[in-house]
Amino acid sequence: MKQGSGRGNKQKRTEVYFERGALRQTQTDSDGAIADYSKAIEIDSTYADAYAERGLILLSRHLDRDAEKDFERYLELNQDGKDYLEQRIKYARYVRDKKRKP
């Protein structure tokens, strides 16, 4: 095994789970998406985007406290992502609340 190839493999595995989570999310398989984002985080706890995406799904399910934990971790890892995340949260809340209205 080449020196350092384990890191590349870890990154690839993380990205595979993240991308599959994103695909599942577009197919409205939010349980599967959460599982894949969680697996990506398990493999690489510094993969910021997985926290943001998982948090947005949790927010859509009214699991605001759990979502907030993911958002906080995302911002710890990606301090430049605050504006982006705030816009995504605002839109997710809009969609969530719109679904509740008859």
Image: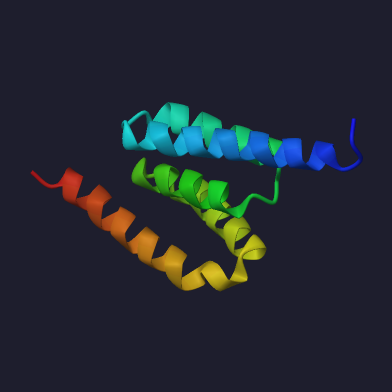
In the rendered view of the protein, which quadrant contains the N terminus?
A: top right
Residue at horizontal 55 percent and vertical 52 percent from the top = 49
Q: Going by the picture, which residue comes out furthest to the left?
A: 102
Q: Is residue 80 above or below residue 40?
A: below
Q: Going by the picture, which residue comes out furthest to the front?
A: 2
- The front one of 97 and 20 is 20
Relative to 71, is 13 on the left or the right? right
- The front one of 91 and 3 is 3
- The front one of 8 and 92 is 8
Relative to 62, is 94 on the left or the right? left
Relative to 99, is 32 on the left or the right? right
Q: Is residue 29 above or below residue 94?
A: above
Residue at horizontal 42 percent and vertical 49 percent from the top = 56
Q: Is residue 95 above or below residue 16?
A: below
Percent across and percent down for residue 86 are: 42, 67
In the rendered view of the protein, which quadrant contains the C terminus?
A: top left
Q: Is residue 19 above or below residue 53?
A: above
How many numbered circles does the render carry? 0
Residue at horizontal 30 percent and vertical 59 percent from the top = 91
- The front one of 21 and 99 is 21
Residue at horizontal 32 percent and vertical 54 percent from the top = 92
Picture quadrant of residue 79: bottom right
Percent across and percent down for residue 90 are: 33, 63
Percent across and percent down for residue 26 are: 33, 37
Which color scheme does this rendered protein use? rainbow
